[in-house]
């Protein structure tokens, strides 16, 4: 059975992906733009830009949504 991560665990994992540059790499390798990521997460393109540059980090609901989106990209990439 797959265990659910707490928001704190998702936030920590997301921060590690952002800090290492893997968040951006996943998006680019999957062929998505910052604008597409922003639409999915319901934030501005500037927010995605700041997250990918580790100038800011997602908080609250955005942690869940961005983490889910990046996880789906990783699954597609692995398939």
Image (cartoon, helix red, strand yellow):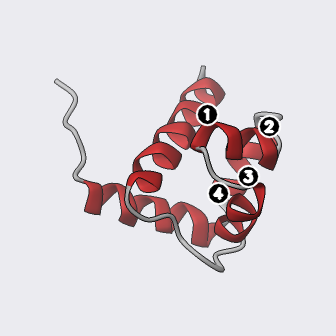
Which residue lies at the image location 48% right of the left edge and 68% below the top edge?
Answer: 15
Residue 61: horizontal and vertical position, in percent? 40, 52
> Which image quarter: residue 73?
top right
> First in sequence: mark 3 or mark 1?
3
> First in sequence: mark 2 or mark 1?
2
- How packed mark 2 is, by other alpha carbons closer than 10 Å (few <14, some 14-19, many 20 or more), is few
Q: For the C terminus, which image quadrant?
A: top right
Marks 3 and 1 in Cβ contact (< 8 Å): no
- How packed mark 3 is, by other alpha carbons closer than 10 Å (few <14, some 14-19, many 20 or more), is some
Per the image, the residue denoted by label 1 is 73
Marks 2 and 1 in Cβ contact (< 8 Å): yes
Marks 4 and 3 in Cβ contact (< 8 Å): yes
Q: CA distance from mark 3 to mark 1?
A: 10 Å
Q: CA distance from mark 4 to mark 1?
A: 11 Å
Q: For the N terminus, which image quadrant?
A: top left
Per the image, the residue denoted by label 2 is 32
Q: 6 or 77: which is nearer to us?
A: 6
Residue 43: horizontal and vertical position, in percent? 63, 52
Which residue lies at the image location 22% right of the left edge and 29% below the top edge?
Answer: 2
Q: 65 or 26: which is nearer to us?
A: 65
Per the image, the residue denoted by label 3 is 25
Q: Secondary structure at mark 4?
A: helix
Residue 11 falls left or right of residue 54 = left
> Which image quarter: residue 24?
bottom right
User: For residue 22, which numbered disc appears in the image?
Assistant: 4
Q: Secondary structure at mark 3?
A: helix
> First in sequence: mark 4 or mark 1?
4
Which residue lies at the image location 22% right of the left edge and 52% below the top edge?
Answer: 6
Q: CA distance from mark 4 to mark 2?
A: 14 Å
Residue 3 falls left or right of residue 17 = left
Q: CA distance from mark 2 to mark 3?
A: 10 Å
Q: For the view shown, which residue lies furthest in the bottom direction? A: 55
């Amino acid at each position: 059975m797959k265990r659910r991560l707490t928001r704190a665990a998702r936030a920590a994992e997301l921060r590690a992906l952002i800090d290492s540059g893997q968040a951006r790499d996943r998006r680019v390798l999957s062929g998505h733009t910052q604008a597409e990521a922003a639409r999915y997460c319901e934030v501005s393109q500037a927010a995605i830009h700041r997250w990918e540059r580790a100038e800011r980090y997602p908080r609250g609901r955005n942690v869940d949504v961005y983490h889910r989106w990046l996880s789906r990209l990783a699954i597609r990439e692995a398939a």
